[in-house]
Image: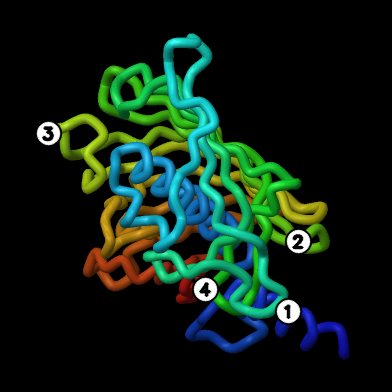
Amino acid sequence: MNRFPRFILLFLTAAGITACNKEPEVLATEPVYRTAQSLHMVSRLWEMVHLTGTGKSAEVLPAGVRRKWIDSTLADMDGLEYEIDFGRITASRPNGRLCPDGFYRGGRFRIRLNSFLWLPGLYAELHMLQQDTCTWSDGTTLIPLRGKVVFEMDNDWSYRIDAYLSSGHENDSNYLRTESMIAFTEDKGFPGQASNLYRLEGEGSLYFGKDSVNWNVLNPLLKRIDADCMGSFFRGTLEARYRRELYSADFNPYGNDACDRWIKIWKGRSEYLVQLN
């Protein structure tokens, strides 16, 4: 009896979850909540690469943080490389620098490119190495990030996104692996324009502890890369399978296309309303 309340408290603190249901019912959303939260994390990392690569760093980086070039020339035929250093992790909350999207970051993020511009043929890698102590925080909970996210731009105005992302602490971490994750631009006026509307499709897996979730996007997840929708999907649905049970999630539960991070999750005939961090 004593373990159950402590686990609820730990989960609420770590995930920052808000629900309209009673506490015992919150646990029913955990597999798909973790999946949606990890996809949002990829979305935020994508924005950081996208905006710094298109000259709009101020929209995603706090004052005093700039990209530092490690290799700034294509003449050596081995691409470009730079890092974004948010500084040391502070011992006290909020454990990092406040960014324009309202969240805190710390450590160094390394980015490698084969081109200066977001044009067809672009290949970019975002690396989060363990020794660089990359972190993300809502101001309360510090979440370490490790792994790699690869972005490739095709000739049909789409990005292929391959994520190998681990988030969280060793005893409570998520590992997201995307498969065939594609982001199509809906605004084809200018390649790589940072305010474009995108739709994401694809599937993948999420691993946490000894458990795994297989997920796929049913209706494209829509997002904008702009100041009002940083890190948010405002429409779309996905399906997730966990321990032979089927879940689904709607990223627009109120039907208003708001970038408020609220999603509705179904497990059988039960439904839950939760807010992603």
Percent position (x, y) of residue 85? 56, 51
Name the residue rendered at 66%, 73% in the picture: 14
Q: Is residue 262 above or below residue 65?
A: below
* Front residue (pair 128, 132): 132
Q: Secondary structure at mark 3?
A: loop
Name the residue rendered at 68%, 47% in the picture: 146
Q: Is residue 252 visible?
A: yes
Q: Is residue 138 above or below residue 132?
A: below
The residue that disc 4 covers is: 270
Mark 4 residue type:
Ser
Q: CA distance from mark 2 to mark 1?
A: 12 Å
State the scheme by which the image is colored.
rainbow
Which one is earlier in the sequence, the residue at label 1 or at label 3?
1
* Front residue (pair 15, 31): 15
Q: CA distance from mark 2 to mark 3?
A: 42 Å
- Tell me the number on the disc at residue 169: 2
Mark 1 residue type:
Leu
Percent position (x, y) of residue 91? 72, 74
Q: Residues within 10 Å of mark 1 (few under 14, many from 20)?
A: few
* Front residue (pair 255, 104): 104
Percent position (x, y) of residue 186? 20, 39
Which one is earlier in the sequence, the residue at label 2 or at label 1?
1
Name the residue rendered at 16%, 38% in the picture: 187
The residue that disc 3 covers is: 189
The residue that disc 1 covers is: 10
Q: CA distance from mark 3 to mark 4?
A: 43 Å
Q: Secondary structure at mark 4?
A: strand
